[in-house]
Amino acid sequence: MYETGSRSWLVNTEARALARGQDILVRHGGVVTRCAAPGVRPFVAALLDRAVDGRIDIDPSEISEGQSSQFETLMSQLVAAGLFIEGSPPAGSEAQDLDPVVLGLWQRSGGSVERAEIHARLRDRPIRLVGSGRLHAELNQSLTDAGVVIGRDDDITAPAVVVGSHEQDPVLTEWNAERLSEDLEVPWLAVVAFNGGQATVGPWVVPGQSACYECYLLRKASNFGTAEISSALAEAEPVGPVFDSSTRYPGLRLIQTGLVVDKVVERLGLQERAGQTVPGELSTISLRFDSIDLENHRVLRVPRCERCSPSAGIGYPQVWFAKEAHK
Ligand SMILES: [Zn+2]
């Protein structure tokens, strides 16, 4: 498809070209940029007309020598305004330029991670998807559709998404214990189906660095409104099987699936530049009487956590102490 020497541009689907008189206004998010160079309106119209699947290929021999500098000036203005994105150099670049997920991540990173790099990461870095039930099946489908490679369960270096049917599901607590015992620091995302009040995506656990899953359970129990129930909950154990509740609210399940897909795709493609998967990060989707609310939280480590804290049960200085201890 590529001819030697041809150049390409991609139409930025997030930007809109509007004409006003002979000028072009490029609206990109909340920003409008005016391009007022002579002939810009027919130039943009002609370029957009020849775009195929959002891509414009131009053979430099089509442009006469006299027009060349004018062409470059107009194109650089339109690229700066955000209407077009410069295509990658030809060799093997088509896949990364044609993959909208790669382009979306590249734009989200402000262009700070190369498109070729994002494309390679999505293709070469599998994740593990652990659990069962309808939410798990939907995540499998949606992550695959987004271009994420679901790897083998025994690939111990692959980050994981672990789906529990309730928050004390052994699939989550056992995964947490096993990862902490490994010293590999392979991160994982806990996902718990809707429990009648909330569905959760997170915390993003980095073993040994962030709050572990038991830390999260301790904090969750201690946040319960009634002190008496709160202490009882912290010590309570699950009884009997819990059935898949994710089938009851298909709309919430889709929102939850969307959040997981976005976080995983961002993490795989942008790695340390991903904003949503910082250690301990947690999102909750809450069903209210008149709305669905999405909130983000950070779960901090719990010094008394017997699973991950080196100072649990011994007299080291703690990062938290009771108010009375200050007297
Ligand atoms: Zn812990």
Image (tube, rainbow, N blue to C red):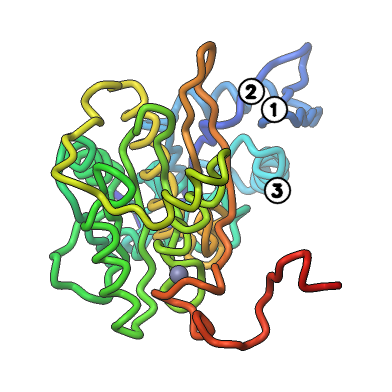
Asked whether the viewer can see residue 317, the reply is yes
Q: Where in the image, quadrant-wise, is ligand 1 located?
A: bottom left
Which residue occupies 28% across, 58% down?
Answer: 172
Q: How many marks?
A: 3
Nearer the observer, 193 or 226: 226
The reply, left or right, for residue 28 in relation to residue 232 is right
Tell me the amino acid under the disc marked 1.
Val
Asked if one can make out residue 2 in the rendered structure from this viewpoint, the answer is no
* Residue 212, quarter of the rendered image: bottom left
Q: Which residue is mark 1?
A: 26
Judged by depth in the image, the label closer to the viewer, 3 or 2, is: 2
Residue 293: name its quadrant. top right
Which one is nearer the viewer's eye here, 40 or 219? 219
Secondary structure of the residue carrying tag 2 is strand
- Residue 34 position, x and y percent, is 79, 28
Q: Quadrant of residue 171?
A: bottom left
Residue 117's x, y, as percent?
A: 42, 66
Q: Residue at x 51, y 35 (%)?
A: 11
Residue 17: mark in rendering: 2
**Quadrant where the C terminus lies?**
bottom right
Relative placement, left or right, of 237 versus 63 is left
Q: For the residue marked with disc 2, what is the amino acid?
A: Ala
- Secondary structure under tag 3 reads helix
Which element carries disc 1, helix, strand or loop? strand
Marks 3, 1: nearer the viewer? 1
Left/right placement of residue 79 relative to residue 214 reads: right
Q: CA distance from mark 3 to mark 1?
A: 22 Å
User: Residue 76, percent across and down?
Assistant: 69, 46
Relative to residue 188, is residue 291 depicted above or below?
A: above
| Residue that badge 3 annotates | 69
Task: Tell me the distance, in whole angstroms, between the alpha carbons under discs 3 and 2.
Answer: 23 Å
Q: Nearer the viewer, residue 326 or 125?
A: 326
